[in-house]
Image (tube, grey):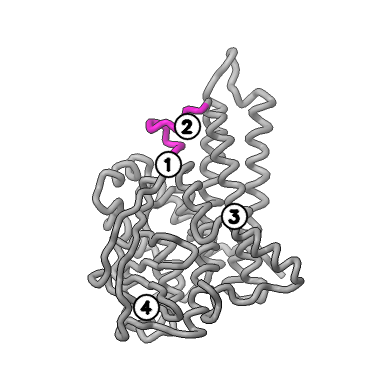
Amino acid sequence: MDFRFTEDQLSLQASLRKALEKECTPEHVRALWQTDTGRSTERWAKLAELGLLGLLIPEEHDGLGMNEVDLVLLLEETGRAALPEPVLETAALGARLLAGTRLAAEWLPKLAAGEAIVAVGHPLNPFVTDAHVADLLLLQHADEMHAVPRSRVSLVHEPCNDPSRRLFRVDWAPRSETRLAQGAETGRLLDSALDRGALACAAQLVGLAQQMLDMGVRYATERQQFGKPIGSFQAVKHLLANVAVRVEFARPVVYRAAHSVAHDTPARAVDVSHAKVAAADAAVLAAKTVHQVHGAMGYTWECDLHIWMKRAWALEAAWGTSAWHRARVAAAVIDGSAPAATFGYNAPL
């Protein structure tokens, strides 16, 4: 079996990287921190033109009809660029959660065209990301899943260490006309959202870790001490090499999880949790190490490094902390089988 990515997949990754290097610079990210939404409608439209937003949407709904194996490389690039727009929520989650529901024909073409944004609530996330720019919110109430227009919710902004992440407490009242699923179907949607959200976070964390490593290597070759680049010193080499090893070990684990999600294998939950832990460990180590290589100046407001550091810390806690995912893997190993549904309708939420 050939596990390599195809030329088309790699070409799409390269195209997105080139576009983001131009459209999502640190200066662009910082500028958005000063805006009300923190998001760029122009860049969102360009992401739709590239096909990113409709990649998982079936062709009958104006999408590309591809799967998570195709998407994982692109999510990695969004992490590398510290992209603030809600690609995770809309392209990785909303596109899949709405597929096959009564709302698919209405909303999926809008998502593919970049004309709508979806926000997703989940028991593992205390707050909803990007609820302020979402046109539709997928929210859980008891054993029901609801699709709620933004006009029917009240939002309270919650502070986040990462200025690019906009978190909100959502107050709303369930109605019969907004009910999307109930009972066992709600549990299925919550489990799907968890695994897809954690996979997307893991892919972005790998991209974040790689970018921080590249920044550390570049700084180590430019910064001189005792007349030599600090990267020539063995201690600095070892620090950065440890990060490189961790990133390279995490990347195939994330790709394996993407395959499991795309094909809904029995090991999906374990593979996703393994990926989330490996990617988060790599990104957190990269943040700590590259910050140290920068001589502790990396956390200062003037240094671009802190953009990626803060995103890594925020994503480590999103869609299940490393401790939560380690526990899920441990339970599966001890039981000797893949875990059952985590959020079944009759399970405590």
Q: Inspect the image, locate mark 2, and give the three-letter code of the amino acid beneath it.
A: Gly
64, 321: nearer the viewer:
321
Q: Residue 186 placed where, x, y %?
A: 47, 80
Which sits earlier in the primary sequence, circle 1 or circle 2?
2
Which residue does the numbered mark 4 point to in the structure image?
A: 146
Which residue does the numbered mark 3 point to in the structure image?
A: 322
| Residue 307 badge | 1
Q: Residue 70 placed where, x, y %?
A: 53, 66
Q: Left or right: where does residue 304 sit relative to residue 156?
A: right
Q: Residue 305 placed where, x, y %?
A: 46, 37
Q: Inspect the image, locate mark 1, and give the three-letter code of the amino acid beneath it.
A: Ile
Q: Residue at x 61, y 55 (%)?
A: 323
Q: Is residue 297 above or below residue 249?
A: above
Tag 2 secondary structure: loop
Which sits earlier in the primary sequence, circle 3 or circle 2?
2
Q: Does the segment drawn in magenta span residue 304?
A: yes
The stretch in magenta equals 296-307
Q: Left or right: where does residue 349 sit relative to residue 256?
A: left
- C-alpha distance separating marks 4 and 3: 28 Å
Which sits earlier in the primary sequence, circle 3 or circle 1?
1
Q: Inspect the image, locate mark 3, and give the three-letter code of the amino acid beneath it.
A: Ser
Question: How busy is the neighbourhood of tag 1: few (under 14 within 10 Å), some, or many (20 plus)?
Answer: many
- C-alpha distance separating marks 1 and 4: 34 Å
CB-based contact (under 8 Å), mark 1 and mark 2 = no
Tag 1 secondary structure: helix
Q: Residue 337 placed where, x, y %?
A: 73, 73
Q: Is residue 304 above or below residue 125?
A: above
